[in-house]
Image (cartoon, rainbow, N blue to C red):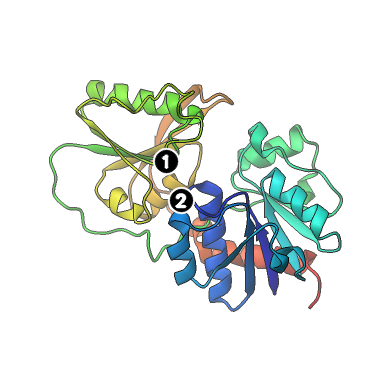
Amino acid sequence: MRILLPVISFSYLTGSELYYFELARELVRRGHDVTIATTRVGGAMEGPARAAGIRAYLLGDARVCGGTFDIIHASEPDPTGWALRTHPDTPIICTIHSQYPCEQPIINPRIKHYVCIRPEVQQKLIEVDHITLAQTSVVYNPVDFSRFKREPEAPRKGKRILFVGTMDLLRKATIMDLIRRTGNENFDLRLVGLRADNYEAAGRYIDRLPARVEWFDQCWDIERHIHECDETAGILLGRTTIESWACGKPSWIYAVGLNGEIKYCNLHAPPADMSPFDSVRVVDSFLELYRRYGRRS
């Protein structure tokens, strides 16, 4: 199949970009013709994408504006709107990554199906956006189990928790709570992720970290950091939690509100059945949707 994947950026190692990288990687491996359309290419994603045979072009490139595709699998409001404008005859399905206003779904009869990355997102689409249950499905973030897997534990002194995510306002309260807990609960904390565009507005809160806390910029080999920690932490059911489960590590899941305020936090052991997160099974689910809604080649 000829598949177009529009996404805001394909440059950083953050949620939507890694989602579409993993999806495109598995589709290319199976012989499908996959193109990513985006506002930003290169950066940290360039090497892994090239190695996986993934093509990524800017939204204005003639190869995506004038190309013919069997299905568009869009993400985020702006790229979805672009797809509706530039490819008026191509069926679209859309992944919704969160229940927050930044991921407000575009409701349009040309969007045939809405994919939700966790049940809470589906609940919001049905109850708030009045999208029917039949128009939605829950398909979790795909994870490459050949990368993220259990390995022998290296001996180390003390406990270490890992938090991976953009250093932004949404995650500030969670990160500050973890920093506070290092003293109260006697563990070290490792932070990995980009400083966000709104980092200044967030109060530069990781500029001065206590002795038991260290920060690393975004990196590709995040599995190395997972294996060097005992537990992970993240907001909602995100990619970091699933990757840590795949490595056999429990994860603290922080439930947060629209402004990042903490509602509650619980430690979750890896589920007995990890198959819903396996990129192979996730792509099986997507190919079923592509065949159901896409054009016949």
**Above/below status of 274 relative to 187:** below
Q: Which residue is mark 1?
A: 194
Tag 1 secondary structure: loop
Place of residue 55 in the rendered image (x, y in percent of width and height, measured from the top left): 58, 68
**Above/below status of 264 relative to 129:** above
- Say whether disc 2 or disc 1 marks the residue closer to the N-terminus: 2
**Above/below status of 93 relative to 202:** below
How many residues crowd around disc 2 within 10 Å: few (fewer than 14), some, or many (20 or more)? Answer: many
Asked if labels 1 and 2 touch by Cβ distance under 8 angstroms, the answer is: yes
**Above/below status of 54 relative to 198:** below
Q: Is residue 241 left or right of residue 119?
A: left
Q: Is residue 137 left or right of residue 270?
A: right
Name the kind of residue labelled 2 in the image.
Leu
Place of residue 63 in the rendered image (x, y in percent of width and height, measured from the top left): 70, 68
Between the C-alphas of marks 2 and 1, the distance is 9 Å
Q: Which residue is mark 2?
A: 13
Q: Residue at x 62, y 52 (%)?
A: 39
Place of residue 201 in the rendered image (x, y in percent of width and height, measured from the top left): 49, 23
Foreground residue among 25 and 254: 25
